[in-house]
Image (cartoon, grey):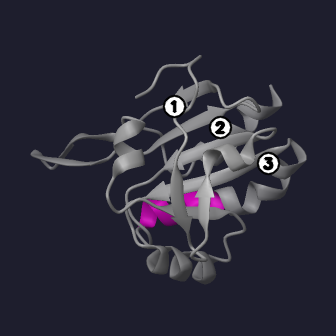
Amino acid sequence: MLPVGIPAPDFCLTDQNGQDRRLSDFRGRKVILYFYPKDMTPGCTKQACNFGVLYPQFEEEGAVVLGVSKDSAASHKKFAEKYQLPFLLLSDPEKEVIQDYGVWQEKKNYGKVTMGVVRSTYLINENGIIEKVFGNVKAADNPEQMLAVLKA
């Protein structure tokens, strides 16, 4: 994971609508950048839906929410449409940004060790500096946690 206080690495990823998005496009706003393992899975769905429910409050705080996984833009589109997600989902099939942000890690599941995305969230300030880092977050609680951090 990246440390607090450094510039967040810029990137260009495709969103669920096929549009290229850069982190630097959101300068001047706080960015909740969250990494999740896979579209349509129970934990990821709960996390995304909770971000969706709270999205108007994130907007009131001047923040944008960006979700990143290695799923395709087409998968993200189905996910966003099925659950009416009001924020951008970014596709990183090559895992470049996932690796740049240090969230591609060893994971243990029922004693088996594999590599995968560790559910993690970054708060990036208006100037593109990493303000807070949360690793291995609980899917259902993460959106409320991030909103509380924004309001603090």
The quarter of the picture where the N terminus appears is top left
Dot 3 corresponds to which residue?
A: 58
Residue 141 x/y as whole percent: 58, 45
Q: Nearer the viewer, residue 10 or 77?
A: 10
Q: Decide if residue 70 is in sight here.
A: yes
Residue positioned 67% across, 31% down in the render: 128
Query: Which residue position holds label 1?
Result: 134
Task: Identify the residue at horizontal 85%, vertical 43% (top origin).
Answer: 62
Taking the magenta stretch, the answer to whether it contains residue 45 is: yes
Tell me if residue 109 is in the magenta stretch. Answer: no
Whole-percent x, y for residue 6 in the image: 56, 20
What distance separates the C-alpha of mark 1 from that of mark 2? 10 Å
- Measure the C-alpha gap from mark 3 to mark 1: 17 Å
Foreground residue among 85 and 108: 85
Q: Which residue is mark 2?
A: 145
Left or right side of 88 for 70: left
Q: Is residue 44 left or right of residue 56?
A: left
Secondary element at image label 3: helix
Specify the amino acid type for callout 2.
Gln
Q: Range of the magenta residues?
A: 42-50
Residue 123, compared with residue 84, is above or below; it is above
> Going 35% across and 63% down the picture, which residue do you hit?
93
**Left or right side of 22 for 99:** left
Residue 103 in view, yes or no? no
Residue contact at pointers 3 and 2, CB within 8 angstroms: no
Name, please, the residue furthest toward the right: 60
